Amino acid sequence: MSNAAMQVRSRIPRIAGAAVERARLTVVPRRRRSAGRAPFLALVSMVLLGGVVGLLLFNTSMQQASFASTALEQQATRLAARQQSLEMELDELRNPQRIAAAAKRLGMVQACSPAFLRLGTGEVQGQPCAGGGPESPSLRINPLPPTKPAILDPPPNVVTVDPPAGDAESTDNSSGDTGRGNPDRDARDGRKKNDR
Amino acid sequence: MPATTPRGTRRGSPQLRLRIGFVVIAMALSVFGARLVQLQGIDPNSYAEMAAAEGIEEVELPATRGEIVDRDGEPLASSVDGMMLVADPKLTDEHAADLAAFLYKLLDVDYVSTLAKLRAHETDEGVEARFEYVARRVPATIATDVVEEAERRGFEGLDTWRDPLRDYPAGDVAANLVGFVGTDEPLAGLERTFDKELAGIDGSARYEVGSGNRLPLGESTTTDPVDGRDLETTLDLKLQWYAQRVVRQTVEDARADSGFAVVMDTRTGELLAVADDPTYDANKPTDAPKADLGSRALQNVYEPGSVQKVLTASSLIDLGLVTPRTKIVVPSQLDRDGRVIHDWFGHGTLHMTLTGAIAQSSNIATVLAADKFKRGQLYSYLRHFGLGRRTDIGVRGETKGLLPPLAEWTSQLEDRIDFGQSLSVNGVQMTAAINTIANGGVRVSPSLVKGSATTDDGQQVGTDHTTRKRVVGEQAARQTAIMMERVVDPDVGVAPAAAVPGYRVAGKTGTAQAVGAECGCYDGTFTVSFAGFAPADDPRFTIYVVVQNPRNGGGGGSVAGPAFSQIMSYALRRYQVPPTGTRPSRLPVAW
């Protein structure tokens, strides 16, 4: 302690002497550590080990997830391609040209002009007509074959043979089709007749 | 005293040590700096490449091209994941014949040419060939299946690469409008016009890989692709198909050069079908002649002929100069300043009403009625009907048509324009003009694209930009419509074949001499047409059928009329439009 401090103390009134005695600063005695180093070291090692193992596990699981995601992405790409192919197939099946051809094969015919039936009054609007009748339009859905030059398209050699007598009942009707209301078949039959 | 002894005798003075330290640091830093300049300044790319080679993978994330769909969302053009099959002839040579047979069976490729590709050979440059296309634009599923199967059977040297596939599921339906995509870029039609919107923007991804898997904590950057926008058209796929078949049958039966039909929604101006013939399969555009790849309905001009009389008559009525009952004395021929005007049918002097002039398609009567126009009036009306102007619906190469400028109009020219000669139109333009009559005198601008889209030259088109403009009064339009009804009347009209039983149909035939491309004169061929709408008193559809150069001697009524009737009948049924049930027009045609 310096002299200046002692001078200050001497100037303090005596009444405060006891208080000053009490307030004097002393060095706190160093406390001895009773705990050993072992637990702390164990804790740190545990944390370290836990951290390393955890990191390793985390990394492994990330890698696993990466494998899974690669596999799933590939699967998604494959499935997307599959979906697109299927949609393409579907669109081709819905192509009006294909549907029309299928309908013709089934013997369906085109409707003539539209007509409406009012259910409330029973009134018919428009002029209804039978499908496949003379008013019904016939639409060719395929282009005509290209016209060939005459040399490639010679006139057919027609030989007329009289049907054997008494066999007039037998007609070209083996499929059980009446031939009526079936212009497709009529056309085919007509062509056959021309060929004959 | 130990305090006076300098502490650093053994280590040297602090100042010296500091200096030496600084020098060492400066030397180290300048080495780093030099290295930095070398790496970044002199040759930055080679190291980046070396890094990339060290397991960094960069892939392109392709944007999906937008679909082109019809008004119900059915695709006219769609994109499918495609692949190309390529071969390394050096490796495939061993089993070339077996592999070619295998590919022929699975992919339907040509056996002989494939075999030649699979055999070891030299390229044109004399180098050993290591790359040949076996098949292009194969759907991805099929391509991968084929390669897997080939590997299973022990064939080597096949590989697949990405090769986007554009599919046109309906084949030739609307092909003339939709266009097609070539190997690298769209080549025609809407595909090309709206390519910027359809194409989208490709993205890319860059990441580190280890044995085929992405490293989780490695470098990874991804730019997502922006898929292309779908283009929605106003077309109706089924109606378009039907119209195309009807037009083809009409063209074939008349042994004509070409033909087209335009179907327009009267109220909205939306084009439901623009059917061209000859057409082509959009999946095989190279099989068709180049002339058939465009749309004749928009890109060709022709003289409209008598269909034009509808516009002349409605303008006259709108000006209050005539009525449908105006009486006209029609001589057998008409001499106008030295040029004689005839009718298509020989006759003596007739007493026709204006309705008769339309129903019988008399040139002389129309010219006489049109004499009441003051100079410039018809020109102004025709401009407002949209003639001589592009419709701008988004089809590339559309023609403006040819309406002579007013300064060139002489009285002879005006006479010819009265009945549809000496001016040219395109099909959609004329449909929109006739539709003006159907729509009560208001011209609705036609549109092909739903909503709004931007063409490659920056023009905004689509239904969002539809304009409506009154051209003639409602009364004038209605009176013109009931005059046109008499055209399909079996007793007094020239085109009974265009009628739709049960419905009131208004229409007009046209048989015009066609101008040949070579001589620029009438070359003796004809353009026959029929334009009309139904139901006449509450129109829903306007249909215009044009056939070029029929060789069966038919006119507008007999060639185009039945086609009109078939398409109209189908459209009315498809959109469930009942007949109006009102009494048909009984306007007198003669007096």
Image (cartoon, coloured by chain):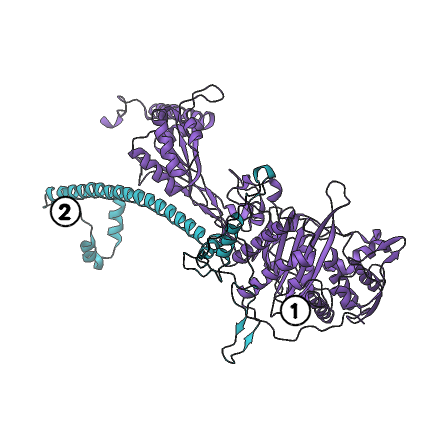
Chain colours: A cyan, B purple
Residue B468: in sight, yes or no? no
Q: Nearer the viewer, residue B405 or B279?
A: B279
Return the residue at label 2.
A29
Task: Look at the image and tell me in which quarter the C terminus of chain B lies.
Answer: bottom right
Outermost top residue = B126
Residue type at numbered disc 1: Ala
Left or right of residue B282, residue B294 in this image: right
Q: Nearer the viewer, residue A102 or B269?
A: A102
Q: Nearer the viewer, residue B136 or B481?
A: B481
Left or right of residue A118, residue A79 in this image: left
Residue type at numbered disc 2: Pro
Where is residue B321 shown, x and y percent of the image? 82, 68
Q: Quadrant of residue B444?
A: bottom right
> Which numbered mark, 2 or 1, is in the foreground of this view?
1
- Circle 2: element type: loop
Q: Residue at x 72, y 50 (%)?
A: B526
Label 1 marks a residue whose chain is B
Where is residue A39 shown, x and y percent of the image? 11, 44
Q: Quadrant of residue B351?
A: bottom right
Task: Look at the image and tell me in which quarter the N terminus of chain B lies.
Answer: top left
Q: Residue at x 26, y 53 (%)?
A: A11
Left or right of residue A20, residue A137 in this image: right
Q: Are marks 2 and 1 in contact (CB under 8 Å)?
A: no
Label 2 marks a residue whose chain is A
Q: Which mark is residue A196?
A: none
Q: Which mark is residue B536?
A: 1
Residue A93: in sight, yes or no? yes
Where is residue B573 shown, x and y percent of the image? 54, 65
Disc 1 packing (10 Å; few <14; some 14–19; many ≥20): many
Residue B193 drawn above or below residue B129: below
Residue A130 drawn above or below residue B185: below
Outermost right residue = B337
